[in-house]
Image (cartoon, helix red, strand yellow):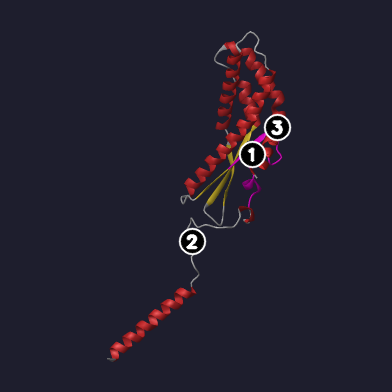
Amino acid sequence: MKKMQAFLVTGTLAVATLVVGCAGQKPQQGGPLARTDTPIQEVKDLPKWVTEKGAAFSGERRVLYGVGNSAGIYNPALRRKAAEGQSRNDLAATLQVYVAGLQKQYMAETTAGSMDKTSVEQHIQDTFKQVTEATLVGAQIVQYWENPIRNESYALARLDIEQFMDIMKSYAAASGQFKELDANLREFVRKNADKAHDELNQELERRKHGAS
């Protein structure tokens, strides 16, 4: 009987200790995918570029940027790769706006002469498309940031328009039919690169305010 009472007392104390111990522990803050309601703008040591998108927000001329982020991916390497991919997509979208402005301006000024107008326009579109694709290949990931309070990563892609200019300068059509047109197009891009850059920034500002 005494052994039974001793066992019960010991068991009671063990349960009490377990309850007190659990009560004294801090609650789990969730796993690596835990949600946080802290706005990204209030996170400590937040890089300025994280909350901006588009053109030369650093004040640099002839430079384009793209910002991408990824969240909810547990594997750090995959999360980083996804953020970098998104930043390149953002950069591609910005460059396309820049090139579309150049193309529109040139279309307005170009005369087809004896050549078929539709063929000329198609060639100009193809030229810009090829130059754009070649330029994006050289885009660099220049910064990377991990959100310290949630499973989220950001990447910053950078593209120097001088690279676009160099590729445009070296571009040569497979057909000699457009040799003179290509020369005129290259000269136009060289002279209007800064103007197109200013118009790009204005367009991105309009889009930003329209989305807000």
Amino acid residing under circle 3: Glu
Mark before the other along the chain sequence, 2 or 3: 2
Residue farthest along the left direction in this orientation? 1
Query: Residue 177, percent across and down?
Result: 58, 11
Q: Kindly identify the amino acid type of the residue bearing the numbered disc 2.
A: Gly
* 190 in the magenta segment: no
Q: Quadrant of the N terminus?
A: bottom left
* Secondary structure state at the residue bearing disc 3: helix
Give 42 or 49, whichever is nearer the viewer: 42
Q: Position of residue 158 (x, y in %)?
A: 61, 38
Tally of numbered discs: 3
Residue for badge 2:
30
Are the residues tagged 1 and 3 within 8 Å (C-beta)? no
Picture quarter with the C terminus: top right
Residue at the spot 41% in from the left edge and 77% down from the top edge = 18
Q: CA distance from mark 1 to mark 3?
A: 12 Å
Q: From the viewer's perspective, is residue 148 above or below residue 208?
A: below
| Label of residue 199 in the image | 3
- x 42%, y 79%: residue: 17
Q: Earlier in the sequence, mark 2 or mark 1?
A: 2
Distance from the alpha carbon under mark 2 to that under mark 3: 46 Å
- The residue that disc 1 covers is 54
For the record, the magenta segment spans 46-67
Q: Could you give the CA–CA distance between mark 2 and mark 1, rounded to whole angstroms?
A: 34 Å
Q: Is residue 49 magenta?
A: yes
Q: Amino acid at mark 1?
A: Gly
Q: Nearer the viewer, residue 39 or 80?
A: 39
- Badge 1 density bin: few <14, some 14–19, many ≥20, Cα 10 Å: many
Image location (x, y in percent) of residue 126: 56, 21
Residue 119 to residue 137: above or below: above
